[in-house]
Amino acid sequence: MAAGLLLLLLLLQRVLASPEVCTNALLPGAKGDQGEVGEVGDEGRLGKNGPTGAPGAAGQMGPRGDMGHTGKMGPSGDQGEKGDTGVEGPSGLKGKPGSTCDCGRYRAVVGQLDVNTGKLRNAVKFVKSVILGLKETEQRYYLLVKEPKTHRDASVNCKLRGGTLAMPKSSSTNRLMADYVGEAGLSRVYVGVKAPSKEAVGTGGYVYADSSPLQGFAAWSQEAELNSTAPAGADAGCVALLSTGAWCRVECESAMFFMCEFPKSRRGRGQAS
């Protein structure tokens, strides 16, 4: 019995050690012959753009094209240097004889007229500046009248002379008039600025002699500005120009010197200097 078991074990060991034991695994066969090439397949979808390649070699220059349209004219260039003098041309034909002219006599007459005009101009300037003592701007003359009068009489006097009481409508005109007063050795004179009524006395209700309102310029003194809203006990609605260039309120019945203005042309009447 024991011998039979031993024999069975030996047979089982040999079977297990044998390399020809069958298994369920399929072993690959030998490599077959190469098949025929198949037909060309359909074109595939376009792939993504690849990176830019290196620039190729420059090609040959093409033929010259046709002339294009004429462009706009450019700016003028710098002036060139003066060229050489050309060859002198032939002499022209002899002209017809001219008429006799006494040019010397005419020149003498014209020269004498120029002299007389200069003398007349100097004479007018002398009359305006020395005898009459006039001051002037481009549009007006100014005359300082040294006759003490009330404001009303002064206004009438200027109108009889063909003008009006002087109206300082700008800082330059006001300065010229003030210097005129100072050069005459005076301290103040009547000018063409006045309140239209006693109720309008104050620096805000004044008008010029031509009834136009004060616009853009006024030279009230500090005292006049401080008293501009105070009730006037007398007719202090008239204005005097001081030699300093300031305006002050004065009584219209006071007698003092005054200044008139005259337009240089009718068209300039009523315009600011």
Image: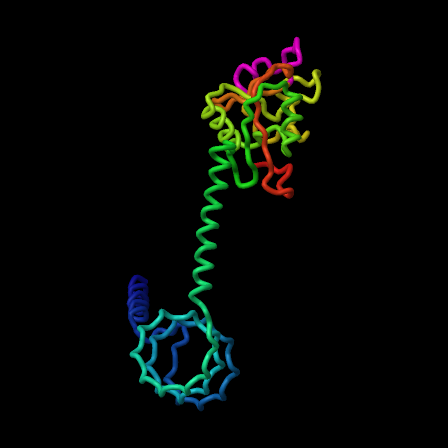
Q: Nearer the viewer, residue 46 or 141?
A: 141
User: Outermost residue, top direction?
Assistant: 233
Query: How was this image coloured?
Result: rainbow
Q: Can residue 229 be found in the magenta stretch? A: yes
Q: How many marks?
A: 0
Instruction: Please check the rendered image and state whether residue 13 is part of the magenta-colored stretch, yes or no.
Output: no
Which image quadrant is residue 268 in? top right
Q: Which residues are magenta?
A: 220-237
**What percent of the width, then of the height, locates residue 115?**
44, 52
Q: Nearer the viewer, residue 83 or 249?
A: 249
For image coordinates 40% across by 86% down, the residue present is: 92
The residue that appears at 50% across and 37% down in the rendered structure is 127
Relative to 245, is 38 above or below?
below
90 relative to 143, above or below: below
- Identify the residue shown where x is 46% and y is 63%: 106
Relative horizontal placement of residue 145, taking residue 113 as reference (left or right)? right
Front one among 4 and 57: 57
- Main SS of the magenta part reads loop
Residue 189, position as x, y percentages in the image: 55, 21
Image quadrant containing the C terminus: top right
Quarter of the image with the N terminus in it: bottom left
* Residue 61 percent location from the top left of the image: 36, 86
Q: What residue sits 63% from the left and 18% below the top? A: 150
Answer left or right for 132 relative to 251. Answer: left
The answer to whether residue 55 is left or right of residue 142 is: left
Where's residue 104, x and y in %? Answer: 42, 65
